Image (cartoon, rainbow, N blue to C red):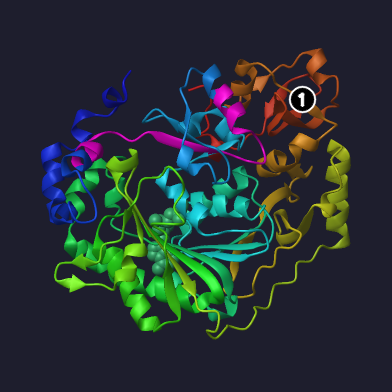
Amino acid sequence: MTADARQPPEARSSRAQLALALRRYRLLFGEVVEDWNGFIDALARPLATCVWSHPGRVEGAALMDLLGEQGVPAAPVPWLAGAPGTALLLPPAFKAGQHWWYCAGLAHAQEAVSQLPALLLGLAPGQRVLDLCAAPGGKTAQIALALGNGGTLLANDFAPERIAALQGNLDRLGIVNVSTTWADGANYPAAAGPFDRILVDAPCSSEGTLRRNPRLVGKMGPERSRRMASRQRALLRKAARLCRPGGRILYSTCTFAPEENELVVADILAEQDGRLRLLPASRSAQPPGLASGPGVIRWQGRVLPDELAHCLRVWPHANDTGGFFVAVLEKAADAPCLPEPKSVALTLEASDADRCAAVAQYYGLPEIGTRFRAHRQTRRGLHLVALDHAAPGAPPTQARGLFFHRTNLRPAKLTTAGALLLGAGASRQVLDLDTPGERDAYLRREILVPTAAQRANCRPGQVMVRHRGWPLGVAVLHRSGDLESLFPRKWSGCTAGV
Ligand SMILES: C[S@@+](CC[C@H](N)C(=O)[O-])C[C@H]1O[C@@H](n2cnc3c(N)ncnc32)[C@H](O)[C@@H]1O
């Protein structure tokens, strides 16, 4: 089936509709970009799906092999070669989330252009980072991995239901260096302390996602963009305050509207009066092989300072992607610095330390406390964070790290996120489901009857389920020989085998 055939015909916008809806940008063509017809043609085509491989779990080539076994063509994105993991383009409308390797946290689906911020932020382990508008967390996860899954990354969002989706993604991907917060980013407390890097991936009119969301075509316009701009300015203004002197802020949107892009950046630069400067994202820093354009410096009678050309615009027809905007700002080294934050003390009572030792012993895992800091946040069970993670006291955190051990059940149970994080190192109570049929039945929560050879390493009780060495989750091996899947219902978007 072709990609176009999969898309309901009424859902795609015609060229004429697109050209009408976007006509106010026509005057940028010939000035900062060429080929209006190519632009409209690109927006009328469906967009390739993009996934990145989890760098700690699978090589890009091995993920391509897994896709090849399913008959799915995959091609690396050359200009994302420096990003964490290998970015692979798959056919449009491909539903990555329904496949076993996705459930097992070997990959994450994220538009190719949306992977630019993690690449352009200049990340290195040891930095303290804030992702101010983080949900559903694709960029958070990439930043977390670029920091080596260590140190401190705060992921904030305004929408509680979107924080739940963010946490689900971080859990599946085994991220242990993130604390999540629920706050209006424009009022983020200064007590959270200075950050070396801040991502402001701002809420926007999303015109650059038209290839994925054709229905947006009726909802765009300058009024909407002007409304969004005041919130965007407030978010960027707060980021300027929270950034450490010498640190960087990356402001990004997925829209074409200069009102939400260069004009927002220009206003904040003017307010900051020399304490912030734009780094040249559109020239020296851009990834090799990416065709990008400069920022707009003239728009509807307003003339912006020349430095706004340092912003980077990715036009959909230049690399066959969605549209994207990036500005990288650096705070002056001699600007005043916020006081360092007070961090929350993470405690582990002796009974909980015994529980950690017991679970490690049960599955034959390396000692947990030498790699992670276990602690209790709720009565439900225990979380793991990176050893050097320091969550601030304000704003209050929603969760610190990954919920790995459910202790309010009898018997206590390793969570699926815990199994995905730790299970590759298990040497006891491991049951391998090596056929695709068994693997998919486990993910669909069906009862399985493993062979005596499969059960050889296991006593009745909880077992770690793996497929070709990759952990999938936990199950209960009953005395009858039945294997009862404990794969979570809420992750069953991963219905497998689709
Ligand atoms: C473009 S999306 C972020 C996408 C995310 N960075 C990712 O890569 O998955 C913008 C997000 O900003 C959040 N948001 C909107 N207003 C906000 C505010 N005042 N403070 C914090 N987050 C806000 C929205 O809930 C939304 O999740």
Q: Image point 21% across, 39% down: which residue?
A: 38
In this view of the protein, can residue 158 be seen by the observer? no
Residue sitting nearer the eye, 294 or 184: 294
- The reply, left or right, for residue 247 in relation to residue 421 is left
In this rendering, is residue 494 above or below 208? Answer: above
Magenta span includes 51? yes
Q: Position of residue 247 (x, y in %)?
A: 55, 71
Q: Amino acid at mark 1?
A: Leu
Q: Which residue is mark 1?
A: 431
Seen in the image, is 263 located left or right of residue 104? left
Q: Is residue 61 above or below residue 340?
A: above
Foreground of the two, 14 or 280: 280
Mark 1 element type: strand
Q: Is residue 329 visible?
A: yes
Q: Which residues are magenta?
A: 40-66
Above or below, comparing residue 204 to residue 365 in the picture: below
Which residue is painted at 37% across and 31% down in the image?
93
Q: Position of residue 116 (x, y in %)?
A: 45, 51
**Which percent across, then down, holds residue 205?**
28, 57
Q: Which quadrant: the N terminus?
A: top left
Residue 274 occupies which quadrant of the picture?
bottom left
